[in-house]
Image: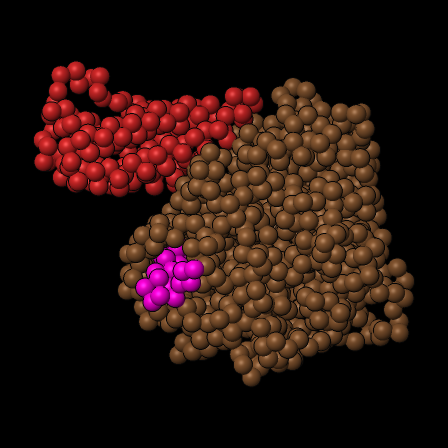
Chain colours: A brown, B red
Amino acid sequence: MTTNRIDDIWGPRTPFDAGESWPERVDTHLVDGLTEADVDRWVQSACLLCSNGCGVDVAVSGGRMVGMRGRAVDRVNKGRLGPKGLFGWQGQQHDRLTTPLVRRGGRLVEASWDEAMGLVVDRSRALLDDKGPLTHGFYTSGQLMLEEYYTLAVIGKAGIGTPHMDGNTRLCTATAAASLKESFGTDGQPGSYTDLDVCDAMFHYGHNVAETQTVMWARMLDRLDGSDPPRHVTVDPRRTKVAERSDVHLAVRPGTNQALMNGLTRELVQHGWVDHDYVEAHTHGYEQLVRTVEEYTPDRVAEICRVPARDVSAAAEIFGTSQRIVSTVLQGFYQSHQATAASVAVNNLHLLRGMLGRPGAGILQMNGQPTAQNNRETGVDGDLSGFRNWQNEQHVQELADLWDVDPLVIPHWAPPTHAMQLFRYAEQGSIGFLWIAGTNPAVSLPDLGRIRKILASEDVFVVVNDGYLTETAELADVVLPSALWAEKTGTYTNVDRTVHLSEQAVDPPGDARSDLDIWVDYARRMGFRDRSGRPLPRWDTPEAAFDAWRDCSRGRPCDYSGMSYEKLREGSGIQWPCTERAPGGTERIYTDQVFNTFDDYCETYGHDLLTGAAVTATEHAATRFDGRARLKGAPWTPPPENPGEEYPLTLSTGRTVYQFHSRTKTGRAEELDRAAPDAWVEIAASDAAELGVTEGDLVRVESVRGAIEVAARVSGVRPGTVFIPFHYGDSDGDGRKRAANELTITAWDPVSKQPQFKGGAVRVTRLAAGNGPAPAPDTGASARVSPDGEG
Amino acid sequence: MHLATYIGLLEQGERTLAESFRQVAHGHAAEADVFHTCLNLAVQCDEHVEALAPLVERYGEHSEAEPERLHADGLSQTRSGGLGLLRDLHDLYLLGSYLDMAWTLVGQAARGARDQEVIDVVAGCDHQTAGQLQWLRTRLKAAAPQALLVAD
């Protein structure tokens, strides 16, 4: 039995009105014509193929995964699943790594665990002895489990003592974290998905939710189809399905988000749509913000962003006059120029109207990946564990006490090294040991030619944990086969702070092991010990790691102290903070409008949004935020690379609904692969006409950094901009380059350090006629337009 | 009347700092954040020079005695590698600090002279110079351990 979520991505509507509860609708997929009667057991889990965090039961028969069923009781999805959730897991049953590989004579050959780990430990030990901990770097994922991240955090920060730890979360969610920290003092999502059930307005900032979180969009669609639909504004350079359903669609020119946000802020001020009592009591920085946005009149914004001035005013009017607003933000802001400033501006709008901490009034600074939140919480991605502040000696001491190590061992002289800097150190040879887990930088990082050179360099010893022989693994010195989702037990947390337990359902293939087991094995072989001589980390099972994390999180915003595996098994997701006082979890934070900006509690003292310069402890104390949110602004500045004569078009990259990341799983699931088998470039009808390009033609897309050859899709992208999905790597055997990141610029946001995948200049040249339409789905934003330009 | 001298010195110093930011940007273009940030900060310095222009006009650019002791040297060339980056950013910091104090002194004299126009120009620029120093400090602190302990 199968639910069709390929053609019918969002499924049948179950409309509801404000204040009603979202109806259940259970989606199921069982392979080979099996029925529920054929299933041996259903194992509780949550989907790992987007950041929504849908509750799911895994069907097991004869020791194999045979299907998925959405959990009707789960608060996140009420039984629904999207295309990736229903079908993507099947990719785990193909082409898996089952034994360690080591590089000999330039080739990767099979080896035993002992042999492979011996090589890893020898190199690690030699470098530590010779040059110390700053030679070691770790680059992880947004798809491992909380227990694995926390274990690695302790090994890296307390065992080795290196600041060089980051995740690919840097590419997807770093700006969500940075913007929350700047505005509210710490990470932690103010909103809850249930805010969507009661809101009277929705704003989507660079968030194609219809394709990136399909089940969340289903919830929104059900409100839009109810009798009291929320008003709806979308900021996106493409005509997405979300944009099509909007009252106002602002198709801004890439690189100009901050100008738009300054314009919206100014409109609130000019029209008196500011709750001055709230601003006075709960924020700091209003006057400075008003001065910063003063020059951004609707006409000026229209000129910079190339959108009609009346649309800017109309959007502001909706924000200014609605009573319960939910804003969601994603990569259109996070992977763009002035990422943190623009995302902070969304927080500002809510603060100016006192629009948070109550039902229906929420901010969802989205995550791109299912477990990105845990990477942030545990501190393997450029933070200290438990949202602690590296500039605060007391916070460092708390960790030193927990881990029983000298606080000097824990690197805290500067923020932990971000991914792009980490790869730069490897390029320069000062990082000589680079461990990559569960991610594929040879497809996902900007300027791939450069990244491949670094990974292939003889000066850097590269270890890769993965389930597949990815483009990255092919360049490694040692490849360790990982157990994937449902082949191990652990927890993870979605965008709205909902923690799910995912139980092991089946055995991993061959000799594959969980990343937790791999890192504990490394730590034991290295002989890491705490001050009392106990092994570090002190645990070696997922549940013991979770219990240790509970202690680490106690008293911090992401407080798990009231949770246990047992409790997570009983229900279907618990929102943190979960404590003795709030044993059932907490739906919404900041309900008292007291924010985490106290000097001794905040995760950061903040940064200058233009340069990333850090505010000092003294400066922060002098301002006396004391629980008030920080209103911070920045002028718009032109992006670093603009289209010109030679490269006249602006590049944007992003996702399609059927694929996830570099397709390691989704590209191996037949239904998904068929729906979006190969890369394409989206071109507006007017640009296509000028270039002599028609639907399906093979074209070359070039930037100063590289070139790819893909099929052209004439779509509803804004004229002057082209869009390329980033999922497709170059290693499909035909030697044709098609990865979007061959073209992208190396530049990142000064505060969040998130790379700018959207922006940069390219040109398009027609090479040949195609065989029919481009291999792009017609179900989402990549849909074909008819010759008259209408969809 | 030495205020004119100091205004001239500020104007010259901002020109020098703008050039030096551009030099470091291009000399360390492989450090993408240094490249983009230094170019942006150079534009700020250009704007400071523009803001100072009417004051220079009004006060006249006095070339006092001992000009060499009132002149800040820019960077003659950039160095390479991790340590080179550290030293170049450190040089920018010295030049920036020199200007930061010059803005303060000009601002003080402007108050003494009750010259609102100068007071306004100082208020519009000096926090940006302070911001430039803050960024240099942040970047230098992050880079120091790697450059001093493990870089070749």
Asked if residue A348 shows in the view, the reply is no
Q: Quadrant of residue A154?
A: top right
Q: Quadrant of residue A222?
A: bottom right
Query: Residue A726, how many percent across, how many down?
Result: 55, 56
Q: Which residues are magenta?
A: A255-277
**Screen quadrant of the N terminus of chain A:** bottom right
Query: Residue A270, how many percent across, how many down?
Result: 32, 64
Q: Quadrant of residue A659?
A: bottom right
Residue sitting nearer the eye, A414 or A271 = A271
Residue A110, magenta (yes or no): no
Which residue is located at x 52 percent, y 37 percent?
A421
In this picture, residue A455 sits left or right of residue A345: right
Query: Residue A775, how many percent across, how many down?
Result: 56, 67
Query: Residue A165, how many percent across, how many down?
Result: 62, 37
Which residue is located at x 74 percent, y 48 percent?
A561
Q: Main secondary structure of the magenta part?
A: helix
